[in-house]
Image (cartoon, coloured by chain):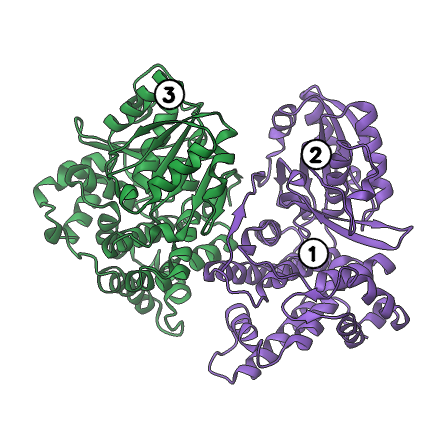
Chain colours: A green, B purple
Amino acid sequence: MNSFIYNIPTKVYFGENQLGNLGKELTRFGKRVLLTYGGGSIKRNGLYDRVITELRSAEMEIFELSGIEPNPRIDSVRDGVKICKEQGIDVLLAVGGGSTIDATKFMAAGACVEHDAWEFFGANAKPIERALPIVTILTLAATGSEMDTGGVISNLETGDKLGRLAQPLLPKVSFLDPTLTYSVSKYQTACGAADIMSHIIEVYFNTQKDLYMLDCMMEGLLKTVVKYAPVAIQEPNNYEARANLMWASSWAINGFINGGKRKAWSCHPMEHELSALYDITHGLGLAILTPRWMKYCLDPTTVDKFVQYGVNVFGIDSKQDKMTIAEESIRQTELFFFETLGLHRTFSEVGIKCEDFELMAQKACRYGDIKGFKTLTQEDVVRIYKMCL
Amino acid sequence: MNSFIYNIPTKVYFGENQLGNLGKELTRFGKRVLLTYGGGSIKRNGLYDRVITELRSAEMEIFELSGIEPNPRIDSVRDGVKICKEQGIDVLLAVGGGSTIDATKFMAAGACVEHDAWEFFGANAKPIERALPIVTILTLAATGSEMDTGGVISNLETGDKLGRLAQPLLPKVSFLDPTLTYSVSKYQTACGAADIMSHIIEVYFNTQKDLYMLDCMMEGLLKTVVKYAPVAIQEPNNYEARANLMWASSWAINGFINGGKRKAWSCHPMEHELSALYDITHGLGLAILTPRWMKYCLDPTTVDKFVQYGVNVFGIDSKQDKMTIAEESIRQTELFFFETLGLHRTFSEVGIKCEDFELMAQKACRYGDIKGFKTLTQEDVVRIYKMCL
């Protein structure tokens, strides 16, 4: 059992009608705010106006950067850095889902250095020692970026999609209002649920011994997603379902469930290459990959973890043979992603072609084998991609 | 479902061999440290020397206050306040269990005001707007004071034992090394486990609708205590057991599991009067009270919560009649406290006398009825006390 440091000081306002606290929290950091958002849905649903009203009553000077894309790009980050530097921004306010928040994190860090923000990524990445303060208003339950230290940015020139973790990227304050996710489409709700599930599965399936308590927490989070994602898809305005998914999304990846686990994640690096090359939704790629990765990993040395998962998350009868329970647990995972959530089942359905597998596998293993639940070589990754066809 | 603010910025170093970070963390706040501890067990087991070595290599000026008692008293708090003021203390380092940490919290707050520290308690309590920074090294898994905003102090003159919550009391940094609890006696380990269980039960048994996710978390924490408390009692040096209990103790009460629940706690106010008058161990008082309180509360309107508890925590067969499951869940709770943990079962065994019930009930209801899972009047409290005889 490894030691660890727990350090998640993000303050969270959870629930409806908390935006009245926005001005108070932002002005702790200064008066000049850069408001970042995506394609403008917040203008259509009235959130933009509510935010502007709060900022004005706090007498803030507002600068804006809109148009941050899904799978956010380094170009957007560069645009934000430029505004921060030129305008002497004090605090960044990201309004959106993980893409907007991720991009905003690297604007905040980029504003504190002289070099280009892309140098925060890759094998010889520059350190992130400081960042301007970040506040978020979450509109999509998925990535957990609102309460974690990470972000993922795409570079269309190099074809790379790379992640980075650093403590200064942690938002200072996040507003989680479940009603802001009422307008999230069925498809995006499903992809978000798959993303949350995957964040937990990446940690839960681990050969390193760790705290039983944290396994219980993860099973609780997984059960929460399994219970409420279908409700949110059927009844988009169901507060209970949206609230459970929203808070689960934060806790799936804020670091709490990790404890001292140090094994690498598996499906995320394989997926990042899909969305880097094809720009598909991250959660969809994860949903297609995860059950195939599970099948690839299942053997007598790993079967116990699948049994624990199947019994405690899906309530499979524990009296059966271990391998039977394990296989059933994977079948239940498939049923959840492809039937309950209604996501596409194969690469073929979403247009991912086998001629790209070698290149994508090579990039997924750019830092060497993926040392996760089972160590995956480049050849293993190609085999798992083939299982997804 | 209520809204809530989540705000637990305590940084935690969890695991063995983390004390090397102590100097670095303390000197962020200054050079003059007040080291507080209890009866001197830390001198016998070598922890005192390790701490002093770290403080000296960080070139800190060390002031000390020892002798903080179990059920800590306002007199100790006053002594600490005096040192803080006279010596211009920058940061307080509490080394011990909940008693030492609780007392240290109010020293830190008392150092920032002119009035007497007892005025932080009671019906007309003074506000706690500031406190000196507090760092803790935990040696007993029980109260959760290492990661929460509260503390409980006794006043022998008035016979009161009163609690207080305030955000400035939250420790900045806490060191949780499970090996430091190896020397905790079987009896204190058992009392600590009962205290942790009670903190969860006080929130879990609640008629207010809240997040299913948080109920899952609470069930996971309860299962963790049920699984590992007996192991720690049988094998005091079992790292896995001590680590699970230690981290569960923090999460049982740091505020995370509360969500938006606003109902009062029930067993804690009833127990505080026992330990105020008889100076018994808090966890023991809770163990005796909890199953009786459960019996007192069980009826057709509350049975569902007991069923959920019995099935999800103790694995009771869910196909039985509801009331049967509920009664079995209370029997399992009794078995756990009185057989597995080996704690005393009745007030008579620990010398608590029925002639004090009226006075204790009156004090437990000093602010009115206890508006918890079921509202308890002073008469209800007397009846529950009588069930404990």
Residue B366 shown left or right of residue B224 in the figure: right
Q: Nearer the viewer, residue A38 or A110?
A: A38
Residue behind mark 1: B192
Q: Check chain identity for marks 3 and 1: say if they share one.
A: no
Disc 3 residue crowd, few under 14, some 14–19, many 20+, Cα 10 Å? many
Task: Tell me the CA gap for discs 2 and 1.
Answer: 27 Å
Q: Nearer the viewer, residue A49 or A298?
A: A49
Residue A359 shown left or right of residue A201 in the figure: left
Q: Nearer the viewer, residue A77 or B369?
A: B369
Q: Which mark is residue A111?
A: 3
Disc 1 residue crowd, few under 14, some 14–19, many 20+, Cα 10 Å? many
Residue B371 drawn above or below residue A116: below
The structure residue drawn at horizontal position 54% and vertical position 56%, both measured from the top left corner, is B260
- Identified by mark 3, the residue type is Ala
Q: Check chain identity for marks 2 and 3: say if they share one.
A: no
Which dot, 3 or 1, sits closer to the camera? 3
Q: Choose the circle earlier in sequence order: 2 or 1.
A: 2
Task: Tell me the CA gap for discs 3 and 1.
Answer: 48 Å
Residue behind mark 2: B131
Subunit under mark 1: B
Position in image of residue A330 (x %, y %):
28, 62
In the picture, residue A19 is in which quadrant? top left
